[in-house]
Amino acid sequence: MPQCIDNLQLKDDLFVNSLLIHELIRELKTDSNNVQNRYLYNISLNSLFLAQTASEASKFLFGWAYQPGRPERNLNISQYYVTYEEYPRELYPRYCSGFGYLMNSKTRDLLTTEGFKIEHPFRFSDIFITGILPETLNFVCETLPFTFYQGSTDECLKLIRKSNTIDSLPSNPPVIICSTGRHIGQNSFSDYHRIWTTLKYIYADRLHTVNN
């Protein structure tokens, strides 16, 4: 882990478009002014570039942000019940959805160091790691310029094909993460194979061209 330059966290019942992630990371390592070496053709990565090249590059955290919301205080209706002893404030800070978030190694190290200072870490890791700790360090989870889909595998495949079609004026950001049957309690490992097969077909020519 210490050798990783960038880290992507997500649940194991989701499928991540690893080929698109590969392109994204490579894009971030490319000179933002060198247009000829830009690989992602249908979204603006300006927010990512600015965060990566900023003087405070140790505050690079992107995901799908939840705005400040109230902790669940009713023990009878939610598994997310939180006591005032656990979290005394009335609102959570802005934090990244557990569907996935991206940070660089400097941010990871900064959050890890800060986290070890906390005697009793908050038990909901997404809120603690991407909300409480960043707030202490004066930054927030920024919006990742991709989208995710939570639903059927068939619909996910349609969206992947549509959002990754080369278009000079794309209307929607590419799908980078999809839920699988396991996300809703079904033992559907075949979903992973179906999505992966589709991704290899979509990206084959483009990746072959880039690698050569």
Image: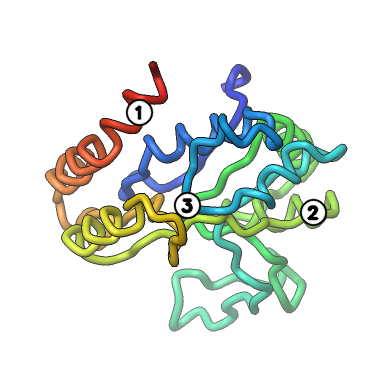
Dots 3, 1 in contact, CB < 8 A: no
Is residue 110 visible from the viewing direction of this image?
Answer: yes
Judge whether 4 appears above or below 203 on screen. Answer: above
Q: Secondary structure at mark 1?
A: helix
In this picture, residue 133 sits left or right of residue 55:
left
Q: Which amino acid, mark 2?
A: Phe
Q: Report the residue at 45% width, 70% height from top.
A: 79
- Of residue 87 and residue 140, the one placed in the foreground of this image is 140
The answer to which of marks 1 and 2 sits earlier in the sequence is 2
Q: Secondary structure at mark 2?
A: loop
Q: Residue 169 got which mark?
A: none
Q: Residue 207 got which mark?
A: 1
- Of residue 58 and residue 91, the one placed in the foreground of this image is 58
Q: Residues within 10 Å of mark 2 (few under 14, many from 20)?
A: some
Quarter of the rendering containing residue 103? top right
In this picture, residue 23 sits left or right of residue 125:
left
Quarter of the rendering containing residue 27? top right
**Where, quadrant-wise, is the N terminus in this rendering?**
top right
Judge whether 23 appears above or below 195 on screen. Answer: above
**Residue where numbered disc 3 is placed:** 42
Q: Residues within 10 Å of mark 1 (few under 14, many from 20)?
A: some
Q: Which amino acid, mark 3?
A: Asn
Distance in Å between CA atoms under marks 3 and 2: 28 Å
Q: Report the residue at 67% width, 50% height from top.
A: 46
Judge whether 13 appears above or below 20 on screen. Answer: below
**Residue where numbered disc 2 is placed:** 139
Q: Secondary structure at mark 3?
A: loop
Q: Position of residue 20 (x, y in %)?
A: 41, 40
The answer to which of marks 3 and 1 sits earlier in the sequence is 3
Q: Position of residue 172 (x, y in %)?
A: 44, 64
